[in-house]
């Protein structure tokens, strides 16, 4: 049986993310594994070829979202009694960043929700699906149901 040593919890702060957090915490306790967190802020393009400049250049939405995400991640780390050093806050594509951080940090289990902010319509959300396909390690998709 696998004995996981480093579990990476990918959290999107969606309505159902608490269930994913609880499952990751349970697994980390069971395996006595290190638990790390990751949240990725989807980068907002300031310029779109179709619309030319979409935002005034002094208005940095990425920075606003990063600051707000940092506060949420710090709060979650505190709730889980983790040091904030064990958290990654990245800017870019969630699927790419989750796989990159897992690869670079000897993660042996990634925990994601089956769905996140993109609705419960599909069997598996697009981030969960991409992580499952590209991860260097096991992936647990916590089945989230609409209730
Ligand atoms: P999705 O496939 O986008 O519906 O999301 C499925 C799961 O992927 C979520 O429950 C999270 O565990 C993870 N996830 C999605 N977006 C992010 C994000 N921006 N940062 C970290 N994890 C994410």
Image (cartoon, grey):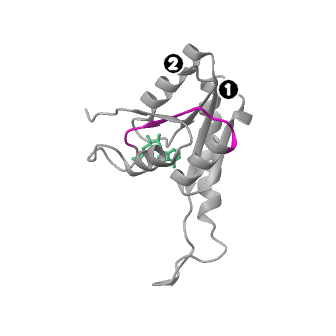
Q: Quadrant of the C terminus?
A: top left
Q: Nearer the viewer, residue 125 or 61?
A: 125
In the rendered view, would you say 96 is above or below 55?
Answer: above
- Identify which residue is drawn at 63% across, 35% down: 107
Query: Residue 18, percent across and down?
Result: 45, 30
Query: Residue 116, percent across and down?
Result: 40, 44
- Is residue 84 one of those drawn in magenta? no
Question: Mark 2 highlights which residue?
Answer: 26
- The 10 Å Cα crowd at callout 1, few under 14, some 14 to 19, many 20 or more, is some
Q: Is mark 1 within 8 Å of ligand 1?
A: no
Q: Earlier in the sequence, mark 1 or mark 2?
A: 2
- Identify which residue is drawn at 61% across, 61% down: 62
Q: Nearer the viewer, residue 34 or 58?
A: 34
Q: Are marks 1 and 2 in contact (CB under 8 Å)?
A: no
Q: Is residue 122 left or right of residue 93?
A: left
Query: Residue 89, percent across and down?
Result: 65, 46
Q: Which mark is residue 12?
A: none
Q: Which mark is residue 82?
A: 1
- Identify which residue is drawn at 64% across, 24% down: 5
Query: Residue 91, percent across and down?
Result: 62, 56
Q: Is residue 34 left or right of residue 16?
A: right
Q: CA distance from mark 1 to mark 2?
A: 14 Å
- The 10 Å Cα crowd at callout 2, few under 14, some 14 to 19, many 20 or more, is few
Q: Nearer the viewer, residue 133 or 64?
A: 133
Assign a secondary structure to mark 2: helix
Q: Which residues are magenta?
A: 104-115
């Amino acid at each position: 049986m696998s004995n996981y040593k480093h579990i990476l919890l990918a959290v999107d702060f969606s309505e159902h993310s608490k269930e994913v957090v609880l499952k990751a915490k349970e697994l980390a306790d069971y395996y006595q594994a290190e638990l790390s967190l990751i949240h990725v802020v989807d980068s907002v393009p300031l310029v779109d070829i179709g619309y030319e400049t979409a935002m005034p250049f002094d208005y940095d939405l990425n920075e606003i979202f990063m600051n707000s995400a940092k506060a949420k991640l710090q709060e979650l780390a505190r709730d889980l009694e983790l040091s904030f050093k064990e958290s990654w806050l990245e800017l870019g594509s969630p699927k790419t960043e989750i796989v990159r951080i897992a690869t670079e940090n000897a993660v042996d289990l990634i925990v994601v929700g089956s769905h996140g902010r993109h609705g419960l319509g599909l069997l598996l959300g697009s981030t969960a699906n991409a992580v499952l396909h590209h991860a260097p390690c096991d992936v647990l998709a916590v089945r989230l149901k609409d209730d």
